[in-house]
Image: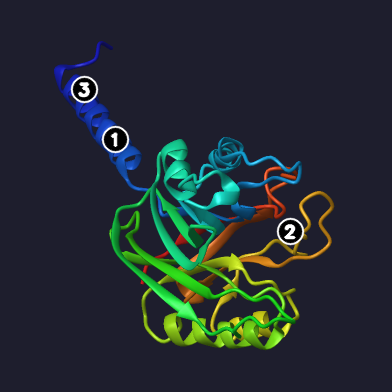
Amino acid sequence: MKPTMTFYRIAAAICVLLAVATTAAADEPSNTLRVLCYNIHYGQGTDGNYDIERLAGVINAAKPDLVALQEVDVGVKRSGRVHEAQRLAELTGMAVRFGPTQHYEGGLFGNAVLTRLPILDVAIHPLPYTEATTERVTYPRGAIAVTVRGPNGQALRFVSTHFQHNVPEDRLAEAKAINELFAGDDVPTILAGDMNAVVDAAPVQELLKHWTNATDDPPAASVPAGNPTSRIDYIFYRPAAAFRLLDAKVVAEAVASDHRPVFAELEWRGQ
């Protein structure tokens, strides 16, 4: 029996509906966020070379939406007066915001955020630290918080920080300050940084009172880069119900910095 004209009309209508549905699915924004945390050792690799292009290659390979950077030089003598934050933004095609924590060798040193998402707000917060003495060298510490418009249109806060390396009391005080700054409201937040503390140490345990650790299980080591033995670099998120961890790993990069980058892929479920 030959198909009728009505059959062709119905078939054509079904094709149109399928095409619309397929297009809608393709156009629907993804709610996944690829996050990287990387202490870049002011651009110097374990081979002694300062190579921002090499670092950018490591970042680009992870295809991140958000990157938290620590130990970033801007106009510092040791790293050739390069504006490392701006240069990494150029090489990765992302927007950048720099959060200086101290003056150093004629320039600035601190944390930064790279993002592919539209930036809504930026805030730089100093963290508590012990002043340096003739017996002990310490550095001012801080956190940069960048609020972006997420893939679902809602505001998302992304924080990059770096805790004190040689004063345990400072690290605990800095963890408590982070909680006071960012764990008391309902803004979905991702916190990433070099906490200079292993998983069971007091600063990390203090953070875990309010944050979820986006980690592989068991947590892989991130330092030293050549032969890592300790995990001190982290990605956390809160509230727990707003996110689902899809993937987490330490990137096997042994030369570009003295730290290995830490990666997490999160599904953002919204507020």
Q: Is residue 171 above or below residue 78?
A: below
Are circles 2 and 3 on residues that touch, CB within 8 Å? no
Secondary structure beneath dot 1 equals helix
Q: Please give the label number shown on residue 222.
A: 2
Query: At label 2, which amino acid type do we have?
Result: Ser
Can you identify the residue that label 1 sits on? Answer: 23
**In which image quadrant can residue 247 be found?**
bottom right
Q: Few, some or many C-alpha atoms within 10 Å of disc 1 (few <14, some 14-19, many ≥20)?
A: few
Q: Which residue corresponds to the image point at 84% horizontal and 52% vertical from the top-left?
A: 227
Is residue 81 found left or right of 233 in the rendered image?
left
Residue 252: x %, y % from top left: 73, 46
Residue 168: x %, y % from top left: 71, 84
Q: Is residue 208 above or below residue 76?
A: below
Q: Earlier in the sequence, mark 2 or mark 3?
A: 3
Q: Is residue 7 above or below residue 119?
A: above
Q: Please give the label number shown on residue 7.
A: 3
Q: Nearer the viewer, mark 1 or mark 2?
A: 2
Q: Nearer the viewer, mark 2 or mark 3?
A: 2
Q: Few, some or many C-alpha atoms within 10 Å of disc 3 (few <14, some 14-19, many ≥20)?
A: few
> Foreground residue, 4 or 114?
114
> Foreground residue, 91 or 66?
91
> Foreground residue, 80 or 242?
80
Figure disc tally:
3
